[in-house]
Amino acid sequence: MITDLTQAETLRFADALAALRDDDWARKTDCTLWTVRDMAGHVLGMTRTFSALPQFVSHMVAGTRAAGERPQIDGLTEVQVKRNESLSTRALVDELRTLAPKNAAWRKSRRLMRRIPMKIDMKGGRETWRLGFLFDTVLTRDTWMHRVDLARAVDQPMTLTADHDGRIVADAVDEWARRHGQAYALRLTGPAGGEFRRGEGGPSIEIDAVEFCRILSGRAEGDGLLNQEVPF
């Protein structure tokens, strides 16, 4: 994802947090171990982690230690939530807004780091990514999907536009299609949706764009080609 999309998504997440009522922060989310407050701490922590090299190194080391025998991401997210749990909700939102442009610029500028390989466990097995894929794509998708989680947790509509959310969804569709490699006709409904097709003779699928992404992320059940996981 390009820099303007990355920055805009962080700011949209901050705006969604700023609109919460006091009791909304304690609500449970689709990330079953987290409340809204925990999830917000994770998103801030991830934004902070990828905003400067010293923070990146420090957080990765702390996350590895906290993970033990588990995947590093589990330890990293735990550290992020814990380090931010004492912040007031206003301070959390303010820091997200301050970090949004720094985070986007730092991720774009990592010319050497983006070549570094990393191992990731997916449903289909272990994959090797380059850090550039994480910087450019997955981190933006992660914040976007947590904004979906937030909207569902507090039962409020999510701000969706074709020029922003539609680009994130279309990119996820493109990766989904590359991963399964089969013919399909896909109609995604809603402001972030669109029509996508590859080849002839494949299944025809019609579904809400956000729900489509929730399924690909593992948050909801899917069958057939919708069983193909995409990283969020």
Image: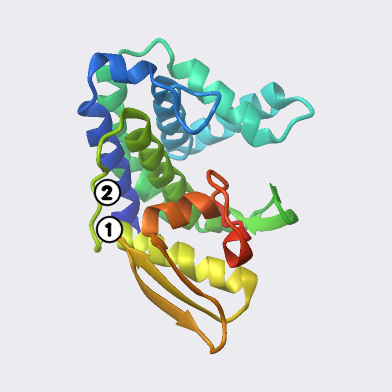
Give residue 200's quadrant in the image.
bottom right
Q: Residue 87 appears at what percent x and percent y?
A: 36, 13
Q: Residue 12 appears at what percent x and percent y?
A: 26, 42
Q: Residue 135 appears at what percent x and percent y?
A: 49, 52
Residue in the picture at 56% in, 22% down: 79
> Which quadrant of the rendered structure holds the N terminus?
bottom left
Kind of residue sitting beneath label 1: His
- Residue that protrudes farthest toward the right in the picture: 69
Counting residues from the N terminus, which is met first, the one under dot 1 or under dot 2? 2
Q: Secondary structure at mark 1?
A: loop
Kind of residue sitting beneath label 2: Ala
How far, Cα to Cα, is label 1 from label 2? 8 Å
Residue in the picture at 57% in, 81% down: 202
Along the viewing direction, whichever of 209 and 223 lies nearer the viewer: 223
Residue in the picture at 45% in, 29% down: 29
Along the viewing direction, whichever of 166 and 185 lies nearer the viewer: 185
Horizontally, residue 131 falls left or right of residue 68, namely left
Q: Residue 169 appears at what percent x and percent y?
A: 39, 61
Query: Does residue 112 show up?
Result: no
The numbered dot on residue 164 is 1
Along the viewing direction, whichever of 52 and 60 lies nearer the viewer: 60
Q: Residues within 10 Å of mark 1 (few under 14, many from 20)?
A: some
Give residue 166's quadrant in the image.
bottom left
Q: Secondary structure at mark 2?
A: helix
Q: Is residue 208 above or below residue 9?
A: below
Q: Which residue is under mark 2?
A: 8
Residue in the picture at 20% in, 28% down: 19
